[in-house]
Amino acid sequence: MTYSSTLAMGRQQGVSRGQNSVSFRVTDKRLGPVSNTIVLIVLACLLGLLYLTQVTKTNAYGYQINGLQQQQSKLQQQHEDLSVASAREQSLDRVANSATAQSMTPVAPSGSVN
Amino acid sequence: MDQQPASVIDPVQRVRIWYALLLLVFGIFAVRVFYLQVIRYDYYKKAALSDQLKQYTVPAERGIITASLGGSSVPIVMNEKLYTLYADPTVVKNAEHVAAKLQPIIGGDAGAITKQLKTSDTRYVILKKKLTPAQSDKILAFKFPGVGTEEQDYRTYPQGTLASQLLGFVDNSGQGQYGVEQALNKQLQGKPGQLKAVTDINGIPLAASANNISTQPVKGDSIDLTIDVGMQAGLEKIIKAAQEQNKSQDVSAVVMDVRTGAIKAMANYPTYDPSDYQDVSDGSLFQNIAVTDPIEPGSITKLFTTAASLQKGVITPTTSFYDPGSWTIDGSKVSDVEEDHSTGQQTILSTLDKSLNTGATWMLMQLGDGRIDAQARSILYDYFSNHFMLGQATGVEQGNGEEASGYLPKPTDTGAGIDLTYANISFGQAYTATALQMVSALSSILNGGTYYQPQLVDQITDGNGTVTKVAPRVVKSNVISTQVSNDIISLMEQNNTNHIAEGFPYLNFGPNYAVGGKTGTAEIANPLGGYYSDRVNGTYMGFVGGNTPEYAIVVYNLQPTKYKGFAGAETGQPVFANIAHMLINDFGVTPKAK
């Protein structure tokens, strides 16, 4: 029994037989089964919609993440390529064959000859 | 009076029928949906996931290998992503046109490329390997049907062939082979990651799936070697020149820091290019023979016999003895290679200087009861095996099972001429040792008596950047006393001085540095019995330092064919001298304090 129906019954008890009074009925404010079902369906749809928007949004972030990861690995790859190129440029053979090294004049070692 | 037609159904009844039909249809749908989604749930879930769920193994990046150069660490083995150009000949259209476009980028012959593109019995031909990213991009820009590139990881060597036999290589399956790559394969490899994700049609992971699992790969450890890049390069240059000059089979040399057992340079020639290991037809080139190939080291061993005899107190550095010119042991004559040396009084120094086999044999006799007996054999064996660690692998970080232990006969008399065998051992024959074993043993004598395990790894950096320094590992202390160490150093220095006077001026290193050594001319055993009469190995064992020795050096010049005189003095000694000059001139050997 809902609170409103209890109230209605209480009010009816206050009117005695043959009393000249205006009879009244309090309108039942309960939602009927159809309304309840519709409300539930609408709520479920709203929830579903909310879920779908969130999933779509998250998946969109997934694409963004994937794009950023690809960019990151590309940059890492470039970094590694540059590191390799740098190491090659500094290799002993390359340095020895460089124009600067070629133009150097050999000096007799002094450490072990004196 | 109105009459209703008999065929007209009551509208209420009709609505009820439609309602019942509708309920029936919905009921069928509901049952079907229940069947598909509840009863067949597992089946369809599995089928859907097999389409959507992708699982990848993310390979871990292999650790790099570095070494020191001018006080800093430089990479000598790195990783590089290169591309393999492939084609599906059944899809390629106008092969001549495609080949003409590819040839300027990948090189080679356009005709040969066309021929490959027209191969009829396969759907996969490899046109070129190891293309750079730029080359790959250029080719893909053509958008030729049936032509593509595939990314592949390769090891790359910025210093070229430097230390190749010491480093080893990584095969196509990502496994280290030979050298450091094999010995430390597990640490270098790292741990692959896992990516399990529900993906879209393009294979891009959808972030919202609860089934996604992403485990990041753990990068392999980076290994910093004890090798000095400059010293290694210099050593390689020296031994290459020696091999070419002496027309030798191989030349090996090792430079070790006597204070720690750290290997500063270790090289063999001929060698190979690890970036083209697949083109090497002679598999023996992959081996670091300074570690894998023991030989009878020859007269350099006399330093060990002398050290053992000094330590046992049976001789002093100034002891003299009568040399009869030959000894007869187990019915065989032991004499000197230098046949013209006269009999008479000899000293420990002259034994080393003239490399007298008779002198070394005499020292062995002093370890026994004035003759080669069980006691003499046991003492020499004890020193060689338990003090100088000969006849056992050193445990250096080289390929699994790659290191040879050498051979040292037990002193037990088996009735097969063990006394003669031990006489031979005393001057460097009848046992075998690698260049690394010899240099490690020599270092233990030079540093005052501590045998360090030879060490190639200086420090290890894990994937998180945590650096672990590898401390020198003492295998044995008190190998010999400090006094004996000083005596041997002094004898080696005097030997070097004598050699300068005997016609080897290149052994003059001036008064500021202490340099000493010993030659060895080792006979080579014939598998059919006895020794070859026309083949020897030239060896040398020495040190460089100031007040104290810093570097121990061992040279194995294997089967030189172009030289005059004794192989040890003519093919081993000059290599040592060049290395010693290089160390003094370029690598900051601390001079003697004035």
Image (cartoon, coloured by chain):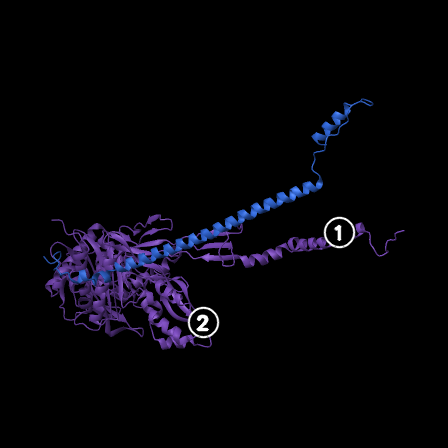
Q: Residues within 10 Å of mark 2 (few under 14, many from 20)?
A: many
Task: State the separation of the CA atoms marked 2 and 1.
Answer: 62 Å
Q: Residue furthest right?
A: B1
Q: Inspect this view and state whether residue B206 appears.
A: yes
Q: Amino acid at mark 1?
A: Tyr
In the rendered structure, the residue with mark 1 lies on which chain? B
For the point 44% across and 55% down, which residue is it? B192
In purple, which chain? B
Q: Amino acid at mark 2?
A: Asp
Q: Inspect this view and state whether residue B355 appears.
A: no
In the rendered structure, the residue with mark 2 lies on which chain? B
Q: Which residue is mark 2?
A: B88
Q: Mark 2 or 1, which is nearer the eye?
A: 1
Q: Residues within 10 Å of mark 1 (few under 14, many from 20)?
A: few
Q: Quadrant of residue B326?
A: bottom left
Q: Colour of chain A?
A: blue
Q: Which residue is mark 1?
A: B19
Front residue (pair A52, B369): A52
For the point 82% across and 51% down, which residue is it? B10
For the point 72% across and 33% down, which residue is it? A28
Q: Up-down: is B405 above or below B127? A: above
Which label's residue is closer to the chain start, 2 or 1? 1
Q: Quadrant of residue B163?
A: bottom left
Quick one: SS at disc 2?
A: loop
Q: Up-down: is B112 above or below B386? A: below
Q: Position of residue B85 (x, y in %)?
A: 40, 68
Q: Position of residue B60 (x, y in %)?
A: 41, 56
Q: Residue furthest front?
A: B1
Q: Position of residue B576 (x, y in %)?
A: 19, 62
Quick one: SS at disc 1?
A: helix
